[in-house]
Amino acid sequence: MAKKNLPVIKVRFIALTVSIVLLLVGMFSIFFNGGFNTGIDFESGLSQRIQIAPVGLEVSYDGDASATLALDNSTITITTRDDSGAEVKSFPSSTYATASELADGLNALDGVTATAVDGSLKTADILSGYGFPATLSSDKTSLNFENSTGDTVSIDEVREALSALGNVQVQTVGSDASQVFQVRLSTNDGDTQASMEEAVSENLANTFTDEGFVVLESNFIGPKYSQTLVSGSILAVLIAMVLILLYVWIRFRIAYALSSIIALTHDVLMLLGFIALFKFEVSSTTIAAVLTIIGYSLNATIVIFDRVRENSELMKNKPMQEVIEHSVTQTLSRTILSSLTTVLAVLPLAILATGSIQLFAIEMIFGIVIGTYSSNFIAPSFLYWISNGLANKKKKKAIK
């Protein structure tokens, strides 16, 4: 018995209606959310990842050599350098389990003075913040530990602490227990990275004391660079679309090229609407996701169109609708398996990763789903409409 064709052309108006509704939802999301949640890449300013964490240990050095303190995989390393060379001493958390034990180990070094502020804190919970390795001196260097007491700070408290700086965006990173917050602050005239970092630290210190927090990461983007990045990203997407149009036009015909571009534009707009709806951060990683999805969706569409072209010769006496539906049905198993395999490869990153990598994976999964849908329903539908339109136009010219 012949395999029944997938009625993609028969349901084309349903597919188009679904797409229009979803696109409108995305557009309204952009409007009601006040635009996209642009990251530091596209909006000049300061972006810091801050963790509220208590001080467990204070270290100072009054020797004649220069000394630095580094942290790698919960192992404290003290490096001293003088004219005779460098000496490195390591203090792993497996041997020095608590802040008290670590302080005893550090005090055994010449010139080093270590004081356990809270000796019960675990060495495995020491945080390596922005500015490490730290240069030791007679001034105390504080080592912060993850908060394990359960007395957590809310995001509203962090917002209140930074409210004097004006329009500051604060987001929670990870679980509430980790006490990690992403802080973004736009630049004003005359602002520099140093001045903005100092302003954030001073305001946080007023609420959480000078050592009650640690800056894990700090990034600064100037206005000129962010504008260049925005224009460059838009140009990259437009160039990709134009090159795709030319490629498909040369390989197939204009009807195939226009249908491919419409489907790809559909995918990009869908992805942007999805990002706006869930308020995901738009950064250079988002542009990478968009370009990747364009390539993935185009590949699936080309496979179907290639089969349509072959079947157009083999099924000359059949209507265009039947040719397209038969071609989509023939490639359906290949399309589903390819999409499923790619989703399964990216899914662990969407679940287990954090930050921009997780967002990239989530956007990829959504883009793959939308790209598969558009390749099998949107692109074939427009190919049918455009091909019929061009054929009718050709017939009218022939009659005249």
Image (cartoon, rainbow, N blue to C red):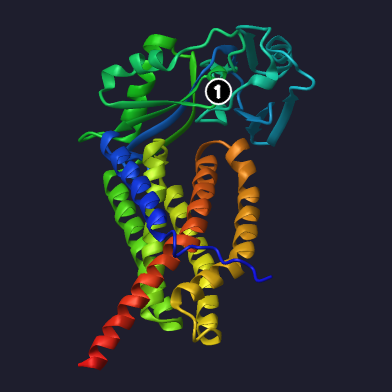
Amino acid bearing label 1: Ser
Give the x, y percent position of residue 75.
Answer: 70, 27
- Quarter of the image for residue 327 reads bottom right
Q: Taking 179 as reference, is 273 above or below it?
A: below
Q: Taking 269 as reference, is 65 above or below it?
A: above
Q: Is residue 44 visible?
A: no
- Quarter of the image for residue 279 reads top left
Q: Is residue 263 visible?
A: yes
Which quadrant of the figure contains the C terminus? bottom left
Q: Looking at the picture, tell me which residue is in the foreground, 129 or 8.
A: 8
Measuring 37% from the left and 10% from the top, which residue is drawn there? 206
Judge from the rendering whether residue 122 lies leftward or rightward of residue 234; answer left or right.
right
Q: Looking at the picture, tell me which residue is in the foreground, 282 or 107.
A: 282
Measuring 38% from the left and 38% from the top, which residue is drawn there? 277
Label 1: how many Cα within 10 Å (few below 14, some 14–19, many 20+): few
Give the x, y percent position of residue 111.
Answer: 65, 18
Measuring 56% from the left and 86% from the top, which residue is drawn there? 314
Q: Taking 178 as reference, is 149 above or below it?
A: above
Q: Looking at the picture, tell me which residue is in the foreground, 178 or 34.
A: 34
Measuring 39% from the left and 49% from the top, which residue is drawn there? 18
Which quadrant of the figure contains the N terminus? bottom right
Give the x, y percent position of residue 102.
Answer: 71, 15
- Identify the residue under disc 1: 175
Judge from the rendering whether residue 85 lies leftward or rightward of residue 374; answer left or right.
right
Judge from the rendering whether residue 49 lies leftward or rightward of residue 78; answer left or right.
left
Q: Taking 292 as reference, is 176 above or below it?
A: above
SS for callout 1: loop
Give the x, y percent position of residue 258.
Answer: 36, 72
